[in-house]
Image (cartoon, helix red, strand yellow):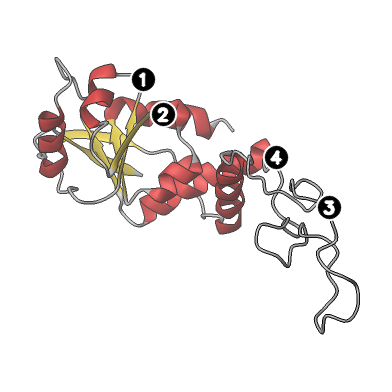
């Protein structure tokens, strides 16, 4: 699969890039995508939630009222979950939500996510960006020139570029990562992928070999 390379001003150039069929041309596996996204979100959970059970609530242990003759239900402790301030029944406790996913399954999920974007024509390749200094206004101008403004955008750099990262950091619908940080969740969470020309070879090499 070949895509045209666009300039920073949004004009199509004479250059073309080749997307590996082993990465962008496969039949997307929706279940693999689901499993990988589920793992990424689960691994990001802190799991520090905690509520007190009745054994942990600090109240008096005195019996509230006599057992019989009150006309109401018997009550032995103010720590009971039935009373305001009492312990919680089966409340959350700290736990680890992370789980393992096979490496080949994760690789298939990444390729499937990229293939879905390719099938829906949501991938745009631009010439390598070079900013002399962090300029959000300059990045915003480039974003609008590509006719992608207002959409969730994932910018994939071939290597770390501090000026490009800082230029896009304040934009709420833009996320910038390097090609070796590419993951299924970020790809599926974006409406469009903006691949820098040099990042295509890195993706082809990283995922094509898996």
Q: Position of residue 7 (x, y in %)?
A: 13, 33
Real-space CA distance between mark 4 and mark 1, rounded to the nearest whole angstrom: 33 Å
Please give the label number shown on residue 96.
4
Q: Which quadrant is home to the N terminus?
A: top left
Q: Which mark is residue 179?
A: 2
Q: Is residue 111 left or right of residue 56?
A: left
Q: Which residue is mark 1?
A: 159
Taking the image as shown, residue 51 lies to the left or right of residue 153, namely: right
**Number of residues whose C-alpha sits closer than 10 Å to that of mark 3, classed few (under 14), some (14–19) or many (20 or more):** few
Q: Which residue is mark 3?
A: 61
Residue 188 placement, left or right of 101: left
Is residue 39 left or right of 102 when viewed as pictured? left
Q: What is the CA distance from the residue labelled 1 to the residue labelled 2?
A: 7 Å
- Looking at the rendered structure, the secondary structure element under dot 2 is helix
Q: CA distance from mark 3 to mark 1?
A: 63 Å
Q: Which of disc 2 and disc 1 is earlier in sequence?
A: 1
Q: Quadrant of the C terminus?
A: top right
Earlier along the polypeptide chain: callout 4 or callout 2?
A: 4
Q: Name the residue furthest bottom.
A: 71
């Amino acid at each position: 699969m070949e895509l045209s390379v666009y300039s920073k001003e949004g004009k199509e150039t004479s250059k073309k890039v080749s997307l590996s069929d082993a990465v962008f041309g496969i039949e997307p596996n929706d279940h693999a995508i689901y499993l990988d996204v589920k793992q990424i979100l689960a691994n990001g959970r802190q799991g520090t939630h905690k509520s007190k059970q009745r054994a942990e609530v600090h109240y008096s242990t005195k019996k509230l009222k006599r057992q019989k003759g009150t006309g109401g239900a018997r009550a032995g402790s103010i720590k009971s979950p039935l009373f305001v301030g009492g312990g919680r029944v089966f409340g959350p406790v700290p736990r680890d939500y992370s789980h393992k996913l096979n490496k080949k399954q994760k690789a298939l999920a990444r390729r499937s996510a990229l293939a879905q974007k390719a099938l829906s024509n949501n991938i745009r390749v631009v010439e390598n960006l070079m900013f002399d200094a962090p300029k959000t206004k300059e990045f915003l101008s480039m974003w609008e020139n590509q006719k992608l403004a207002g959409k969730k955008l994932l910018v994939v750099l071939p290597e770390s570029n501090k000026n490009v990262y800082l230029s896009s950091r304040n934009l709420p619908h833009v996320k910038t990562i390097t090609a070796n940080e590419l993951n299924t969740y970020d790809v599926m969470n974006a409406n469009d992928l903006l691949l820098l020309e040099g990042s295509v070879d890195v993706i082809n090499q990283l995922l094509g070999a898996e």
